[in-house]
Image (cartoon, rainbow, N blue to C red):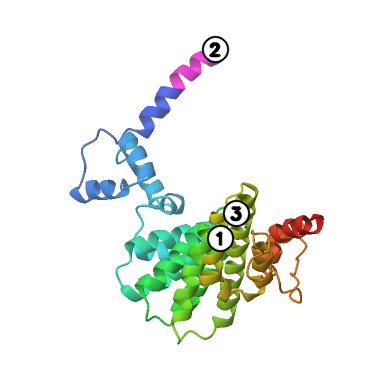
Amino acid sequence: MRLSALCYLVPAVYLFCVSDMYAPPRMPSRAAEGSKARQSGWGNTLGSWFGDSKWFKKLSESKLFKSTRKTFRDMSFDELKVARTHHKVHSDTHVKYTERMLTLCDEAAARAELLLELADGMRVLGKLDIAAARYTEFSQFYPGHAKTEYALYRAIDCSFKRTKSFDRDQTRTMDTVELANTFLERQAFATYRSDVEQVRTACYERLIASELNVCDFYLKANKMHAVERRLETVRTTMLKFAPEMEKEVALMEGRLPGGGELSTDVSRSPLIRVATGKKDQELKERAVGTDTAVKVAQATQRK
């Protein structure tokens, strides 16, 4: 009995809801309002089902419907700007709105501010690759901007935090050195100059440690010419930026046949830095631990 009642009730409710769907429009403005209510989001779906029924018109004018009428892609620049204020600064959603606003912005000054905000947001979220690229983009597109020094410094900082230990690929370290040199060439940049100099010194120390690690491999393979070429490159291009690595280089030269140019100077004993488990952290704070130097010292003691 109940099942048969439901069979009659469901079609009756459906016909009641869509009773106005097939009726001709009473006024031209009514049709215009109905088409306007079916702009996007739920309107496209519900409007195709229920047309210009009275209850659908009320639903389209409600706050619930209006809050979801436009998707993220359909929002204008001003709408995105307002919606962004409801989210925490540098949060994932806030950064997403900023990135979308950047694509819609045409004003140069506003684009500069949005680009810097986007880079800051990516840095806070830990996306250092994207942050470094955005900071570098800002410094290249707006070289005369008041915040160019800050942007280039942040690019160097993010790039340095992405570098790897000395026994791995050093491409990112060389990229950081290039950015640091670009910064130091600008004499007007004085606020972060000392920090950038320290970062560049730490990068060169890591590059030298990497070269010494390769030299150690070539020495074991008895490829002395390769060792000599690498040590010459270290002395001519790197050592002047990281003088603290002088004694490690001298120690490696002492392992060459003939003793190397500094091996006979007994008064200049090599400075051995003991490698610890916190080596990478110390490198980022300019205290570079060199496993190669430790191995070389042990080999020298055995001799």
Where does residue 146 sit, x and y in percent of width and height?
43, 83
Q: Which of marks 3 and 2 is in front?
A: 3
Q: Distance between the residues labelled 1 and 3?
A: 12 Å
Range of the magenta residues?
A: 1-9
Crowd rating for badge 2 (residues with CA inside 10 Å; few <14, some 14–19, many 20+): few
Residue that appears at 49% across and 14% down: 4
Name the mark nearer the viewer: 1 or 3: 1
Q: Is residue 145 magenta?
A: no
Near mark 1 (Cα within 10 A), the count class, few <14, some 14-19 or many ≥20, is some
Earlier residue among tags 3 and 2: 2
Q: Is residue 186 left or right of residue 164?
A: left
Q: In what element is the residue under mark 1?
A: helix
Residue at disc 3, secondary structure: helix
Please say whether residue 80 is visible from this viewpoint: yes
Q: Do the residues labelled 1 and 3 touch (CB within 8 Å)?
A: no
| Residue 224 point in image, percent of width and height | 58, 54
Crowd around label 3: few <14 · some 14–19 · many ≥20 (10 Å): some
Q: Position of residue 46 (x, y in %)?
A: 36, 38
In the displayed structure image, the side of residue 88 where residue 37 appears, left or right? left
Give the numbered dot on residue 214. Answer: 3
Note whether residue 88 is visible.
no
- The image position of residue 277, as x and y in percent, is 76, 56
- Which residue carries the number 1 mark? 228
Q: Name the amino acid type tagged 1.
A: Glu
Residue topped by disc 2: 1
- What's the amino acid at mark 2? Met
Who's the residue at 38% across and 48% down the image?
60
Q: Mark 3 or mark 1, which is nearer the start of the sequence?
A: 3
Quadrant position of residue 78: bottom left
Screen quadrant of the C terminus: bottom right
Seen from the viewer's position, the closer of residues 23 and 266 is 266
